Amino acid sequence: MYILAINGSHRRGNTDEILKKILDGAAGKGARIELVRLLDEKIENCKGCMGCETTNTCKIGDNFPKLFDKLLKADVLILASPNYFNNVSAMMKGFIDRMNAHWKNPAIAGKKVVLVMPGGYSKESIKRGMRAFEEFPRICKMTVVEKLMPHVDGPNEAKEDKKLMQECLELGEKLVIG
Ligand SMILES: Cc1cc2nc3c(=O)[nH]c(=O)nc-3n(C[C@H](O)[C@H](O)[C@H](O)COP(=O)(O)O)c2cc1C
């Protein structure tokens, strides 16, 4: 089993720690894991040229096609973004927009997705952000199997929250053993 996690945080903080722990859990049960940080990738924003509407490909030459290939191969895709203004981060939104060439692709329909969105403000804000995040897999007809939206704010809060870290480890294990 191959589990791909995509981190849309603009820093190495809570989202990163959460993902590392989920992936630790999955690896412990035998999964092949990979963590891609959009922060480290050269992925440009969609130019809105609409070329993909007719060609089903994007003419921008950057790292996106490589990432999309990984996404296609993943048995479980973990999409993670901190809550920014009750929505996904700009980097995660940039990635989502680049999926315009592929959202109708039957190869991604039914793909298992875990959504992770830490937030530092109110419960309502955290819920609204997740609602916005859920739109992407819904439009792509992917299957959301787990959602995690912990309340953490300072960059080390997730790492220091033992209960959360344990929950993440167990979530990772569950993704493999069911
Ligand atoms: C630009 C910006 C906007 C934010 N907006 C929200 C918000 O609307 N709701 C919320 O719960 N947290 C919000 N936060 C807090 C982050 O979601 C929170 O600190 C999160 O733990 C950051 O995760 P990270 O360490 O992986 O980047 C915002 C943070 C930033 C930088």
Image (spheres, rainbow, N blue to C red):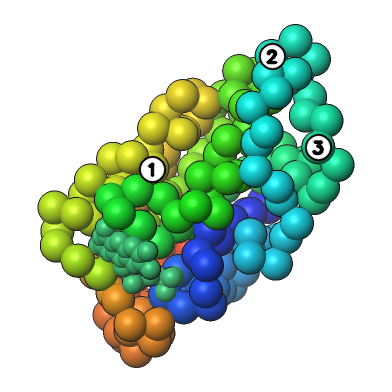
Circle nearer the N terminus (3, 1) = 3
Question: Badge 2: how crowded within 10 Å, few (<14), some, or many (20+)?
Answer: few
Any part of residue 15 in sight: yes
Q: Residue, x 55% and y 54% (percent of image)?
A: 91
Q: Residue, x 46% and y 34% (percent of image)?
A: 136
Question: Badge 1: how crowded within 10 Å, few (<14), some, or many (20+)?
Answer: many
Whether the residue under disc 1 has CB within 8 Å of ligand 1: no
For the residue pair 112 and 37, the one nearer the viewer reads as 37
For the residue pair 144 and 8, the one nearer the viewer reads as 8
Mark 3 touching mark 1, by CB under 8 A?
no
User: In the image, is 152 to the left or to the right of 73?
Assistant: left
Image spot of residue 7 (x, y percent)? 55, 61
Query: Alpha carbon of mark 2 to alpha carbon of mark 1: how far?
Result: 23 Å
Query: Alpha carbon of mark 3 to alpha carbon of mark 1: how far?
Result: 24 Å
Q: Quadrant of residue 61?
A: top right
State which mark lies toward you, 3 or 1.
3
Q: Residue, x 63% and y 59% (percent of image)?
A: 38
Q: Quadrant of ligand 1?
A: bottom left
Question: Badge 3: how crowded within 10 Å, few (<14), some, or many (20+)?
Answer: some
Residue matched to label 3: 60
Amino acid under disc 1: Phe
Any part of residue 5 in sight: no
Residue matched to label 2: 53
Residue matched to label 1: 133
**Vertical order, 102 against 166 (above or below):** above
Circle nearer the N terminus (2, 3) = 2
**Vertical order, 13 against 114 (above or below):** below
State which mark lies toward you, 2 or 1.
2
Circle nearer the N terminus (2, 1) = 2
Image spot of residue 11 (x, y percent)? 52, 74
Amino acid under disc 2: Glu
